[in-house]
Image (cartoon, rainbow, N blue to C red):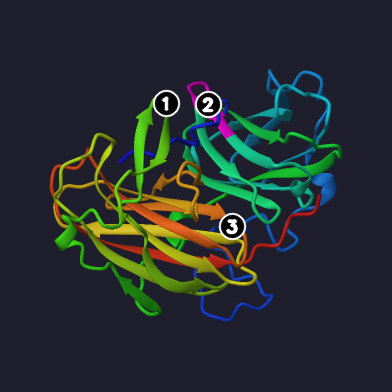
Amino acid sequence: MRALFLTALALAPALTAGCGDDGGTSPVDGATAPDAGGGDGAPGDCHPETDDARNDATSEPTGATFGGQRVAVCGNVDIDHPAGDLVDRDLYQVTVAPGSPVVVRLSAPLAEEVERLDLLVRDAGGVRAIARVRAGNAVTTLVLPVGEYTLGVEARSAGAVTSFPYRIEMNADTPALRCPPMGGGTIHPEADESASGHRANDVIEVRQQPPLLAAMATNATGDAPDATQEAVTAGSRFAVTGSSANVTTVGDEYRDRDTFSFYTGSTTNQLDLRVAWSGGIADLDVLVFESDKPTDPMGTPTAAVIGEEIVVTSVEPQTQYWLWVGGSNRSTSFPVAYTVYICGREIAASPI
């Protein structure tokens, strides 16, 4: 199973679950280190940005080596690099040794000053992950081998006028504890698609454009998400069950594609999702989209273990999202039964 590298069509390739209500208490993170929230860290413990004039093209050295302890970078989105809608791009170099699972978070409480703010993780081969800021945060999880990496912040806006600070943190992660498979909670079964040839809820096609992927809406008439009518609140979970059918690809990287709609709760600002499957030799990919924005996926999937994949993404509270599950052409056996576990979380912003 390989991780997916994602982009919207217009984006240049620059690039634990608990139980409870939707109150103000953050659930315990599924990582061995705090997930950059709840007062973790302090403003003075990070590498300060020192080369804004040049770090848009050349990664600014931080001297930091991540070996399981937190690495932090503090910088500023400055309105001084206008190039089309590009407001600012800041790049920082860090070393990972030994290789390990990591969670990388960008905190920017004033991110609404620009139209779009992205967190990027790159290696020598290009972009490993892109995460979009929502509700003041962007987050991605990866498994990084030993090597040199660039942590980037990219701001885009047609009319930004105010600079603002941000903080990037890299922490150790434990993928097995992110929304792990377990019983309980609401389960939404996929609606029967047999009458439509298993094409009723495709909604989105995902096509490979190496080294990234692009998403687009299908042209099928009546193609619509399977409405779960569920809201995932902070500290709660629910699950979606379905089958990736044995159908012929329409030309993208997938055969059957299934899309489900759901909502976030009033304080939910992060989703941890895990898809698990069984039955045959298969590879399923899971993506999250904001409702009615099929060209712009949220977050980058990470392979967890054989037969499972994880997506972690920041989200806006009280917003409709689409869950997308695709049966990859890399699979050799269909149909494949799957379950997607969706965990809602409330993560406090790190101090800036």
- Report, in whole angstroms, how far the alpha carbon at label 2 lies from the one at label 1: 8 Å
Label 1 CA crowd tier, 10 Å (few <14, some 14–19, many 20+): some
Label 2 CA crowd tier, 10 Å (few <14, some 14–19, many 20+): some
Q: Residue 13 carries which label?
A: 2
Residue 16 visible in image: no
As drawn, is 52 to the left or to the right of 324? right
Residue found at x 67% / y 75%? 25
Amino acid type, callout 3: Val
In the depicted structure, whether residue 124 falls above or below residue 65? above
Q: Pointer 3: what residue? A: 315
**Residue 260 in the image: x percent, y percent?**
38, 61
Label 3 CA crowd tier, 10 Å (few <14, some 14–19, many 20+): many
Q: Is residue 117 found inside the magenta-colored segment of the image?
A: no
Seen from the viewer's position, the closer of residues 274 and 208 is 208
Residue found at x 59% / y 57%? 315
As drawn, is 40 to the left or to the right of 302? right
Amino acid type, callout 2: Pro
- Report, in whole angstroms, how far the alpha carbon at label 1 lies from the one at label 3: 25 Å
Mark before the other along the chain sequence, 1 or 3: 1
Q: Give the range drawn in magenta.
A: 121-126
Amino acid type, callout 1: Pro
Q: Which mark is residue 211?
A: 1
Identity of the residue furthest to the front in this view:
221
In the depicted structure, whether residue 162 falls above or below residue 35? above
Mark before the other along the chain sequence, 3 or 2: 2
Secondary structure type for disc 2: loop
Dots 2, 1 in contact, CB < 8 A: yes
Secondary structure type for disc 3: loop
Mark before the other along the chain sequence, 2 or 1: 2
As drawn, is 288 to the left or to the right of 29? left
**Residue 297 in the image: x percent, y percent?**
48, 45
